[in-house]
Image: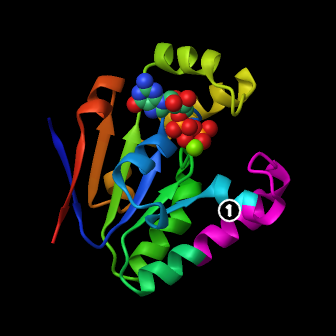
Amino acid sequence: QSSLQVPAFSLILLIGVSGAGKSTFARRHFLPTEVISSDHCRALITDNENDQSATGDAFELLHWLAAKRLQRRRLTVIDATNVQADARQSLIDLGQQFNCPLVAIVLDMPEQVLNDRRKTRTDRSFADPVLHRQRRDLWLWTRYLEYEGFSTVYRLKSADEVDQIQVVRQS
Ligand code: GTP
Ligand code: MG
């Protein structure tokens, strides 16, 4: 079993396309209150976590919540796709504003795994072009995370790897 070391106070961005397992990972390794999910923020505003028209408001709420937590030096996990560099930038700025170490956990699952999960998933379905764009963004825009300001980058490339992982908080 391998471990992902994270500072006890850190801003952790989960990065991955829809179905990569971000929410599952967040549930398994963190307290519900430590996780801020863009879908949950959408739901808080519109009662519907799939209402894409609320995306702008949802991210405003997400940022506001994250800022309040970081101000109190609480470990904070962002559960959003975060596949594009410009989507990450404002969160990186936020972390830096609070002198908070930034951790990226990339769930970079093989296409086969994503396709299999999509077939069996009942809570959500995305059209092929959306997933395709997300996959392309992940591939293009997550190569230089260290240069973006992340002090630690973990990239998990298989479901097995994700299964074996343990998150260890450094004090
Ligand atoms: P979005 O919220 O749409 O961006 O997806 P997500 O990245 O949050 O994925 P989520 O955690 O909801 O997982 C999607 C599907 O994959 C669910 O049906 C999960 O049960 C399944 N899944 C996620 N992680 C794992 C895993 O590690 N192993 C297995 N076997 N299934 C997983
Ligand atoms: Mg999710």
Q: Which residue is drawn at the image coordinates 74% and 57% (left, top)?
A: 43
- Foreground: 146 or 67? 67
The vertical placement of 12 against 158, above or below, is below
Count of all numbered marks drawn on residues in the image: 1
Left or right, 159 with reference to 1? right
For the stretch drawn in magenta, what is the main secondary structure?
helix
Q: Which residue is drawn at the image coordinates 31% and 54% (left, top)?
A: 146
Left or right, 130 with reference to 167? right
| Magenta residues (range) | 44-64
Q: In which quarter of the image is the C terminus?
A: bottom left
- Foreground: 141 or 113? 113
* Residue marked by disc 1: 41
Q: Which residue is drawn at the image coordinates 67% and 64% (left, top)?
A: 59
Circle 1 — which element? helix
Colour convention of the picture: rainbow
Q: Which residue is drawn at the image coordinates 54% and 44% (left, top)?
A: 83
- Foreground: 125 or 121? 121
Residue 144 drawn at (x, y percent):
37, 47
